[in-house]
Image (cartoon, grey):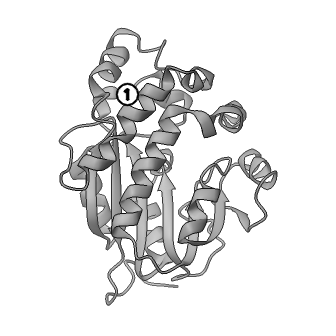
Amino acid sequence: MEEQLFDEMFRHAARHWWFRGRWRIVSSLLDRYHPRTPGRVLDLGCGVGNNFEALVRYGEVWGGDTSPKALEYCRRHFQGRLDAVLLPDRVPYPDEHFDLVVMLDVLEHIPDDAAAVRRVFRLLKPGGTLALTVPALPWLWSQHDVEHGHQRRYYKRGLRRLLRAAGFEPVKLSYINSFLLLPMGLARVLLPSGVSSGRHLEPGTRPRAHLLEAIFASERHFLRALSFPLGGSLAAICRRPATTPSAEPRP
């Protein structure tokens, strides 16, 4: 991700309709599928730390990111542990250390996503939870993906296969950002290097953006009973089985 985008995120992401709507969906899924007992939580790919305050309800929060600039922003408002992390190899945590790992739009940045998911599996305690979001539908690829340093977008079937190969049990896996998929798709096709650009987040904080947030976040109510067949993103809640060995042998 371009370093300039962390400046934008620090200034605007906490009020941006897409980040707010995404978190409302993820937190609803966690409340439904993650055990209520507080534990140790890792926000992996934490960016500027917008989710730290909300994650405290699930336990002691740690943050990790590959960008020194992102971690510098985190230190302005977070007193907990922060680490430089580069999946899958530069990970300063022992195996079976976390009860919950949160990776929100992180996996698509990593060249070897399969190795990254296997490493995250090892970081979780048996019975631990992974909360994951990724951009979906390769045909939505645009300048936005380029500017954000994405390696790929995912289909549901491929993401499920990736998670299961690492040893995870998907508890809930669904497309999200489904209600806004049509205007998003039209924007990608008609203005591939214009409105889809991700360099400037401020327009997403203007008064009319509250409507977009309400539409996006409302999907959480439907996800209690169903999974969407298409959407601009995918959300997954996965569990490391309580009784099986790690997905790859320890050295």
Q: Nearer the viewer, residue 31 or 146?
A: 31
Q: Is residue 180 left or right of residue 103?
A: left
Vertical comparison of 219 with 179: above or below = below
Q: Amino acid at mark 1?
A: Trp
Q: Residues within 10 Å of mark 1 (few under 14, many from 20)?
A: some
Q: Nearer the viewer, residue 30 or 131?
A: 30
Residue 1 seen anywhere in this rendered image of the structure: no
Identify the residue at the far bottom of this view: 243
- Quadrant assignment for the N terminus: top right
Which residue sits at x=45%, y=40%?
Answer: 21
Vertical comparison of 106 with 56: above or below = above
Q: Nearer the viewer, residue 149 or 27?
A: 27
Q: Quadrant of residue 30?
A: bottom left
Q: Which residue is mark 1?
A: 141
Residue 163 seen anywhere in this rendered image of the structure: yes
Q: Nearer the viewer, residue 189 or 182?
A: 182
Which residue sits at x=63%, y=68%?
Answer: 61
